[in-house]
Image (spheres, rainbow, N blue to C red):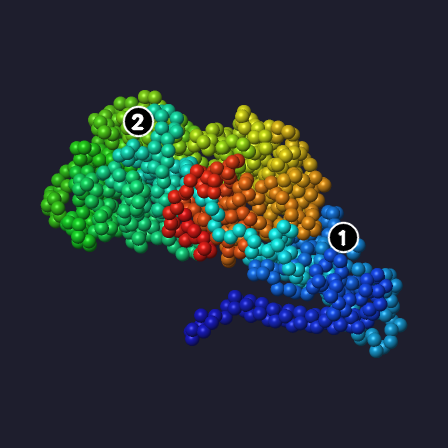
Amino acid sequence: MDGAGGPGKGPSHEALQSLSQRLQVQEKEMELVKAALAEALRLLRLQASPTSLQDSGMPAPTRDSPAAPPGLPPTCTLSLVSRGTQTETEVEMEPSPGPPGLSNGPPDPQGGSEEPSGTQSEGGGSSSSGTGSPGGTGSPGILRLVHPPQRSDTARRNSSSSSSPSERPRQKLSRKAASSANLLLRSGSTESRCGKDPLSSPGGPGSRRSNYNLEGISVKMFLRGRPITMYIPSGIRSLEELPSGPPPETLSLDWVYGYRGRDSRSNLFVLRSGEVVYFIACVVVLYRPGGGPGGPGGGGQRHYRGHTDCVRCLAVHPDGVRVASGQTAGVDKDGKPLQPVVHVWDSETLLKLQEIGLGAFERGVGALAFSVADQGAFLCVVDDSNEHMLSVWDCSRGTKLAEIKSTNDSVLAVGFSPRDSSCIVTSGKSHVHFWNWSGGAGVPGNGALTRKQGVFGKYKKPKFIPCFVFLPDGDILTGDSEGNILTWGRSVSDCKTPGRGGAKETYGIVAQAHAHEGSIFALCLRRDGTVLSGGGRDRRLVQWGPGLVALQETEIPEHFGAVRAIAEGLGSELLVGTTKNALLRGDLAQGFSPVIQGHTDELWGLCTHPFQNRFLTCGHDRQLCLWDGEGHALAWSIDLKKGIFLNSPSLLSQETGLCADFHPSGAAVAVGLNTGRWLVLDTETREIVSDFTDGNEQLSVVRYSPDGLYLAIGSHDNMIYIYSVSSDGAKSSRFGRCVGHSSFITHLDWSKDGNFIMSNSGDYEILYWDVAGGCKLLRNRYESRDREWATYTCVLGFHVYGVWPDGSDGTDINSLCRSHNERVVAVADDFCKVHLFQYPCARAKAPSLVYGGHGSHVTSVRFTHDDSHLISLGGKDASIFQWRVLGAGGAGPALVTPSRTPSLSPASSLDV
């Protein structure tokens, strides 16, 4: 900026001016080229004689002629177009208005069955296209007639040096125009590089760049400004006859797999009803255990789904019924911030009773605690701002009573003293703070918080103090990162300070016990007065008596991870949450077994069993997990890091599963990895039966043909690899490659006869392949409009283009799946939502049912074999949701509740 406040004259401004000048020059050049082309075509039409058409066996059309050539609509007329020095007869379609949403265009004029070296895709991308043969069979709606050689010779003689001087300037202009046209068509212009639609620029060099219109042939949509043309099946006469409105089927959340123990605390409690309450993603789960202690699960789940972003912490009211849950801040689909808030809700009715702190917290809610001495009248909240603001709230009114800056260090735990609500304790990074809340008597803003820092004195100051617990005698036990349990005793200070108690009580360390190797993550006071401690590194669970005497201990198996949280159940039963997102049930004598398990990192791969209610998942945690959808349990899992079945141990730390698919026999499952490697596992023995590598880039999709004879593997190297497969899926051999995409493969589907493939790519191409015929690219996409597909997971196609919202950038939809009965389509979007549409969904702005719950982008959705359930994967929240499909022949009406989360779909969509 200069002193006068004018615009800067820096390099960016100069570059902008230079680009603007270049653009003006290019626009002028284009106008000159257009003028030259128009003049050349005018001269060619003047030179052309009507008898040339009669010589070719076709009557010369007139504008008054009502008849059109065979196979063409009555709106077609014939015109001439120049190909270098050879003149052709070509059909030109007169535009005719179509119904809203239709952009009419003819099929690809370059028909034929031979595989080209490249092709223009149905979608936005483009490959290098060869020149089609003039004698090839064209698609319906295009007629090309090649004139006899005499006409070509005549044209060449007219352009020779023997021409009269008066004709030479016109001939020179004509040649220059034709040359300019060929140059424009051959050059890699910005328009063609950005994926110019094939209907706007059909054919190879010299072909006519006209936008043909043919009513009822195609529809067109745009992603990032790129046109994507899709041909309408012949059985659909009008888009108006397609179904409209949301589907009659609905979804009801049946089960949530996983538990957020990896990076959260205060996440496991037992209610008065005996239900275990914990959270994952945006859902608070109320789990009712089944069977005896240490036995298998089999219980049920209920879900509180009032939050709009990930839940971070929980607190249970002293009455054992009310629950407070705090969520993190987030953003909606438009980038607008979603403010963190605390919900106080009834665990029996799942109804929200109070919303606390909307607009008062920053970044998120990190810790919560109800007061105990006054029957839970107050709630203490610590947010995730830089100052970690500590505030006290009236639970019944939802009003703030006091607030103070806590510390710039992270706060991991907060709690009221059970004997005196004026005493609040916080702990976290390198600190234990004792707070005195004075005055107020429940009057908003009339209380004060004062802090006294815990002094470690002769004891080593730990780096973290993750947990603490109040003892019945008023002392406090803290667990720290050094593996020590410190006892803090109460003492009366010499000085008098204003407050509730007059003489201010303080805490000091009176004892220390080394309890664990590594950090202590959890402390729990049992009903009998003993204390349980859970270790991180040593994974030990220890019971302590008076004077911190160890009474009993057990060790959690390594594959479950370290102890994150401990809760006391009925009788001697204990619930333990682990850092590997598992929830264990048992006791110290008999040990523990898992009742809830989950992944620990971002999920991408999902496939459902062909005839059982089972599904397989894989992701960045390098775990392959097979789940039993009926028993809601993990059937088996394989750890890629251990390399039990891999041949290259050096790659173990890098290889993650990204995609998977079951063989139709159910005896084998193929898994694609991020290194170009793919494996086939026997689903019974869990042994590897095939191990191949195709390229060195990640694989995004693997898909068996419906008859199980082929396996297609879509890679980020832009190729689809085809393998022949044995009847049991155990053996595979390379059959061929599908080459032609100009970007990485994203989705693919097989036809019902197992001979063809439809594929999508990262630059929005839609291509079709004849696999049985030698992995050939089908250049005439119009002929594939009526082909039936065994599955529909491609996100681009006529039958599903209505799922895309306005203004989409092409990455908003991650996954799509059509039900096996071909009635509905489920969509996973980038805004934490699952959508349900009618099928086919071929109307713009189609309405949908929208379901929330995931706290991250939804990466995949799949229906089970009988369409009774839908499985959805959360990305970074590592959650797996199992939805029950209800209505339209289902088990009954679904419970529909409005969601606060802004919907991705248009206003006609319903949030569920």
Q: Is residue 595 left or right of residue 616?
A: left
Q: Which residue is mark 1?
A: 137
Disc 1 element: loop
**What is the three-letter code of the residue carrying label 1?**
Thr
Which residue type does callout 2 highlight?
Glu
Task: Answer above or below: position of 188 versus 668.
Answer: below
Instruction: Return the x and y of residue 475 as percentages of the image width and height.
Output: 19, 34
Q: Which mark is residue 573?
A: 2
Residues 437 and 269: in front is 269
Mark 2 and mark 1: span between their CA atoms? Answer: 76 Å
Rendered image quadrant of residue 508: top left
Q: Position of residue 255 (x, y in %)?
A: 41, 37
Looking at the image, residue 780 sits to the left or right of residue 336; the answer is: right
Q: Position of residue 133 (x, y in %)?
A: 78, 54
Q: Please report the residue visible at 32 percent of the width from the left and 24 percent of the height from the top.
A: 588
- The picture places residue 407, in percent across and down from the top left corner, at 28, 48
**904 sits left or right of 789 in the view:** left
Taking depth in this image into account, of 824 and 386 the one nearest to the observer is 824
